Amino acid sequence: MVLVCSFSFASPSGGLSGLMHALANAEGSVTPLSFYTNIHSDVNLGLLGGTKIVDGLYLNGQSFNFHIVSDKKDSCARIGAAFLLHTIAFPIAIYDFFDPSSHSINAYYVMVMLLNPTLEFYVVREYVPISVGIGYNTDWFAFKPKQKFYFRAHGDVNIDLPFVRVTASYSYSFLDTYDLKKGFSFYLGVALFRFPVSEGWWSKS
């Protein structure tokens, strides 16, 4: 199954207003299915993509992320509430399909970039492209009386192979979120269905 999501952005002006305008006005691109984990407590499955800022520099975001953090104390796994926020994109997209002048989906694109942004730069672009990135991930585990928040900053090294991206991340969690404790941890990830496009996340021209 090929998963497609049209995160489109262009940029006419600087500052925060220019960024927000960029997040609401870009060209669509093919979106890969991403998976990353720190092995023992934190797992995230979602769609990954973004837009080109300048040559070699990209702003990425994660959408529809199904995020799970284990909780050994209660012998269960906690599902992040951000997943429910992402479900609003489906009815909004249908509404925009029947009313192309609405552009309501643009608000969702902005939300995606604010919740889980990554700034990525390609240090090697030929043969086997390699990039580095920095960003953060947020979530809210609302389905429990003692609700917990999740905030993790990360630095990444990405290797783009044919149709697959492999990512290694060194992260710092600012909060204790169930079994994921405050401090540094190492993450591994893959992104599938990655196709080169002329504009968008995976275009390096």
Image: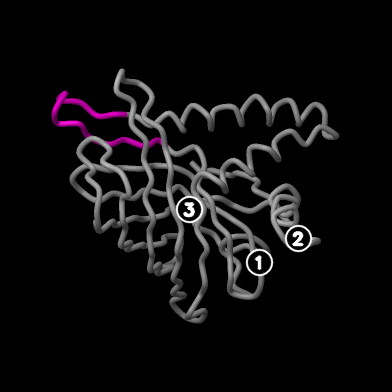
Q: How would you rate the neighbour count of disc 3 (Cα within 10 Å): few for under 14, some for 14-19, many for 20 or more?
A: some
Is residue 69 on the magenta stretch? yes
What range is drawn magenta here?
A: 66-78
Is residue 65 on the magenta stretch? no
**Horizontal relation, residue 9 to residue 181: left or right:** right
**Magenta span main SS:** strand
Whether tag 3 and tag 2 are in contact, CB under 8 A, the answer is no
Residue ID for mark 2: 11
Q: Is residue 123 above or below residue 87?
A: below
**Horizontal relation, residue 142 to residue 95: left or right:** left
Q: Is residue 3 above or below residue 59?
A: above
Residue ID for mark 1: 53
Mark earlier in primary sequence (3, 2): 2
Disc 1 secondary structure class: strand
What separation in Å lies between label 3 and label 1 (alpha carbons)?
Answer: 23 Å
What separation in Å lies between label 1 and label 2 (alpha carbons)?
Answer: 8 Å
Q: Any mark on residue 193, and which?
A: 3
Whether tag 1 and tag 2 are in contact, CB under 8 A, the answer is yes
